[in-house]
């Protein structure tokens, strides 16, 4: 297997991983906020959120900038997809904040719950956007 095939395979795996992580984060938010009110559920959600945020970062370029495989995995297309997905996450966070602001004002939701909803909306939107853009580019 040559370097280009290996990069394509790892790129598809990252895209699928992003979609799976987005689903797990959303599930952790729903279960943690509605079904289980425990420290474990809160910690699991926080861990998933951190993993999702780290997945969207260009860590390959930072760790080994001279690797030819990392250059293939972090080309201009991937950078543009990352930028577009972060834009989608920003708009999702803004909409979630505007939607939950009246609930927080009337103390229906606690500030912690609002922050979880906003962060989950941003990360899930960004992860889904990045995963679908990468899978579409891999075809």
Image: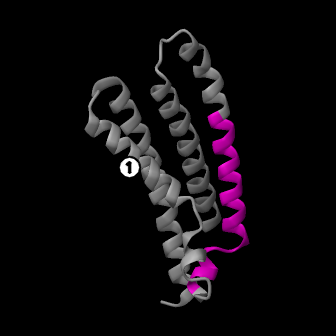
| Residue 79 shown in magenta | yes
Whole-percent x, y for residue 60 in the image:
55, 74
**Magenta-drawn stretch, dominant element (helix, strand or loop):** helix
* Image quarter hosting the C terminus: bottom right
Whole-percent x, y for residue 34 in the image:
35, 23
Task: Assess disc 1: are there few (<14), some (14-19) or many (≥20) residues with their C-alpha within 10 Å of its C-alpha.
Answer: few
Whole-percent x, y for residue 72 in the image:
62, 80
Task: Look at 67% across and 32% down and name the residue there.
Answer: 94
Residue 27 lies left or right of residue 97; in this view the side is: left
Whole-percent x, y for residue 21 in the image:
43, 51
Of residues 94 and 2, the one nearer the viewer is 94
Of residues 14 and 48, the one nearer the viewer is 48
Asked if 66 appears above or below 28 in the picture, the reply is below
| Residue 68 shown in magenta | no
Which region is colored magenta?
Answer: 69-93
Confirm whether residue 139 shows in the render.
no
The residue that disc 1 covers is 47
Task: Look at 58% across and 13% down and name the residue there.
Answer: 105
Q: Secondary structure at mark 1?
A: helix
Asked if 45 appears above or below 33 in the picture, the reply is below
């Amino acid at each position: 297997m040559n370097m280009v095939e290996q990069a394509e395979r790892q790129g598809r795996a990252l895209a699928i991983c992003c979609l799976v992580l987005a689903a797990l984060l959303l599930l952790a938010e729903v279960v943690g906020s509605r079904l289980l009110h425990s420290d474990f559920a809160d910690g699991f959600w926080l861990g998933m959120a951190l993993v999702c945020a780290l997945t969207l970062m260009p860590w390959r370029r930072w760790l080994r900038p001279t690797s030819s495989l990392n250059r293939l995995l972090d080309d201009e297309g991937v950078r543009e997809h990352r930028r577009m997905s972060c834009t989608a996450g920003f708009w999702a966070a803004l909409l979630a904040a505007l939607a939950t602001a009246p609930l927080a004002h009337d103390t229906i939701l606690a500030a912690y719950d609002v922050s979880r909803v906003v962060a989950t909306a941003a990360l899930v939107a960004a992860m889904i956007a990045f995963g679908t853009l990468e899978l579409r580019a891999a075809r």
